[in-house]
């Protein structure tokens, strides 16, 4: 299986490549990608530098152009596709059918991957995207159980990629009604969940408070790990008490089912985290490289090293992990 790793900056790209990534994915410095945060992403000069570094080490580079174009600025998205094609990247990751059509018609030799934002959950959907746009790979949504992933992979004629580690999203892959409600900006159009310009931190009586557009999201005691304020992972006052009513801070970690993902026909595993630091990327990629190498060397003897889990737990939201929808009993 291919290890696909996040590169929110050149130092993060370097960290991913140096620690064993087979491919890195990145975005341009605008809202054509779903991690449009201040200080992240690549202009042309940085992209050229990143491409040189990756290619010298036989690592692929994918460009995410995975937000949905806004009608008044359609040209901005098509220009992003043109730029990716001009740099001869190894693939572009997209969700919008109109943009996929533009890429397929204008740059027929440009490899296309269907983004998780496309929310394709069946082999029939993937067949449509393959027949109409010629996609070569699809990133499956994080709402499918392991049997569902296996069913799609076995019947699909495109390569399947799944998320293996990182933050989870309770919405339909970027269509965040909570972020839209509180900030009037949705990740799948504006490229950021809880945009930084709406975030404010305040300390009151020794308690750290996080606010999003003037709304108190969470409070943290001294020494408590403070998470980035997203409404879904905030604490709410309910009749049962104060707590995480929608989603507790936790990270996806599929090391324990790596063998099952491979046996299901998954061709690539993806690490979430283009907004993360180079140190985070280096540590996570290092662990996953070791795990994949061990599995490749002895598929039947694969076992999760407890040290891997300890290292990843330190980098997880809320210092806890889950295998998410992969283990749910209902389908």
Image (cartoon, rainbow, N blue to C red):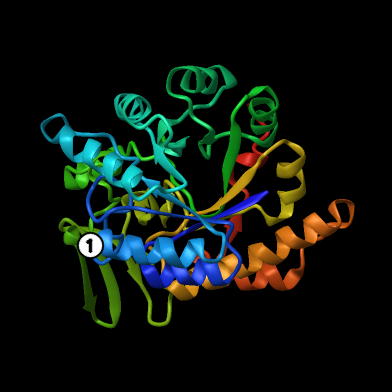
Q: Position of residue 239 (x, y in %)?
A: 39, 47
Q: Is residue 178 above or below residue 42?
A: above
Q: Is residue 73 left or right of residue 281?
A: left
Q: Position of residue 245 (x, y in %)?
A: 42, 48
Q: Position of residue 190 (x, y in %)?
A: 22, 44
Q: Is residue 228 above or below residue 117?
A: below
Q: Residue at x 74, y 61 (%)?
A: 293
Q: Which residue is mark 1?
A: 211
Q: Is residue 17 left or right of residue 32?
A: right
Q: Residue furthest right?
A: 300
The secondary element bearing badge 1 is classed as strand
Q: Residue at x 26, y 59 (%)?
A: 44
In which quadrant is the C terminus drawn? top right
Quick check: can you spot residue 52?
yes
Q: Position of residue 278 (x, y in %)?
A: 44, 72
Total marks shown come to 1
Q: Residue at x 24, y 36 (%)?
A: 78
Q: Quarter of the image holding residue 46?
A: bottom left
Q: Is residue 120 above or below residue 17?
A: above
Circle 1 Cα neighbour tier, 10 Å, few/some/many (<14 / 14–19 / ≥20) = many
């Amino acid at each position: 299986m291919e290890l696909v790793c996040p590169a929110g900056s050149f130092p993060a790209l370097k960290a991913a490549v140096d620690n064993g990534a087979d491919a890195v994915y990145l975005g341009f410095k605008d809202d054509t990608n779903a991690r449009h945060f201040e200080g992240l992403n690549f202009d042309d000069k940085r992209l050229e530098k990143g491409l040189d570094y990756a290619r010298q080490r036989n690592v692929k580079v994918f460009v995410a152009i995975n937000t949905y174009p806004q009608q008044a600025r359609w040209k901005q998205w098509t220009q992003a596709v043109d730029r990716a094609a001009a740099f001869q990247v190894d693939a572009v990751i997209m969700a919008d059918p109109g943009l996929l059509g533009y890429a397929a018609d204008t740059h027929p030799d440009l490899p296309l991957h269907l983004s998780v934002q496309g929310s394709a959950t069946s082999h029939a959907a993937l067949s449509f995207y393959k027949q109409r746009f010629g996609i070569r790979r699809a990133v499956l949504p994080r709402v499918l159980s392991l049997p569902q992933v296996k069913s799609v992979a076995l019947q699909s004629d495109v390569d399947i990629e799944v998320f293996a580690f990182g933050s989870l999203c309770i919405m339909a892959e970027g269509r965040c009604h909570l972020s839209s409600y509180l900030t009037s900006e949705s990740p799948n159009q504006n490229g950021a969940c809880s945009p930084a310009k709406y975030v404010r931190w305040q300390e009151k009586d020794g308690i750290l408070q996080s606010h999003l557009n003037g709304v108190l999201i969470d409070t943290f005691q001294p020494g408590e790990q403070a998470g980035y304020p997203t409404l879904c992972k905030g604490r709410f006052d309910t009749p049962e008490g104060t707590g995480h009513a929608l989603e507790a801070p936790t990270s996806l970690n599929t090391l324990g089912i790596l063998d099952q993902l491979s046996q299901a026909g998954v061709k690539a595993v993806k690490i979430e985290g283009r907004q993360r630091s180079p140190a985070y990327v280096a540590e996570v990629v290092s662990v996953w490289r070791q795990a994949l190498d061990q599995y490749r060397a002895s598929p039947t003897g694969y076992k999760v090293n407890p040290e891997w889990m300890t290292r990843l737990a330190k980098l997880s939201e809320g210092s806890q992990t889950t295998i998410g929808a992969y283990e749910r009993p209902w389908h």
